Image (cartoon, grey):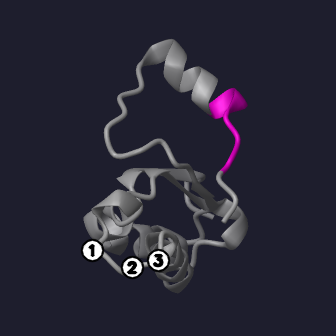
Amino acid sequence: MISHSPVLVLAPHTDDGELGCGGLISSYIEKGADVYYVAFSNAYISLPPGCHKDTLIKEVTAATSILGIPDGNLFLYDLGIVCVLFGRNLKQFFLGMPIVDY
């Protein structure tokens, strides 16, 4: 185990974490870190017509699995694309908001 564990990846949208720091995530996992991934929006409204609403959920689930993040460490929320969380609101989010179940 490394001294920087656990590691929390906070991604505004489902592809931001793996695209923005996938190499670092992989490196931490290879060194034994316990990595958690939180995506605040599945951004499905950005999909082209004809794509199923859960496309980006499936993609982030596959990508994080390839990186080595266990399914139990992946938390996906559906806050929409534009959502800003500060202070108390962020604390309430982590303490009481339900996880989206697809």
Residue 12 x/y as whole percent: 36, 48
Foreground pick, 50 / 69 = 50
Helix, strand or loop for disc 3: loop
Which residue corresponds to the image point at 43% horizontal and 75% vertical from the top-left?
26
Tell me the amino acid under the disc marked 1: Pro
| Residue, disc 1 | 48
Give how far across and how far down residue 21 sits, in percent.
Answer: 31, 64
Residue 8 locus on image (x, y percent): 51, 50
| Camera-nearest residue between 87 and 44 | 44
Residue 19 is left or right of residue 65, and the answer is: left
Residue bounds of the magenta highlight: 94-99
Residue to which mark 3 is pinned: 52
Quadrant of the rendered structure where residue 42 is?
bottom left
Image marks 2 and 1: residues in contact by CB distance under 8 Å: yes
Secondary structure of the residue carrying tag 1 is loop
- Numbered tag placed on residue 51 in the rendering: 2
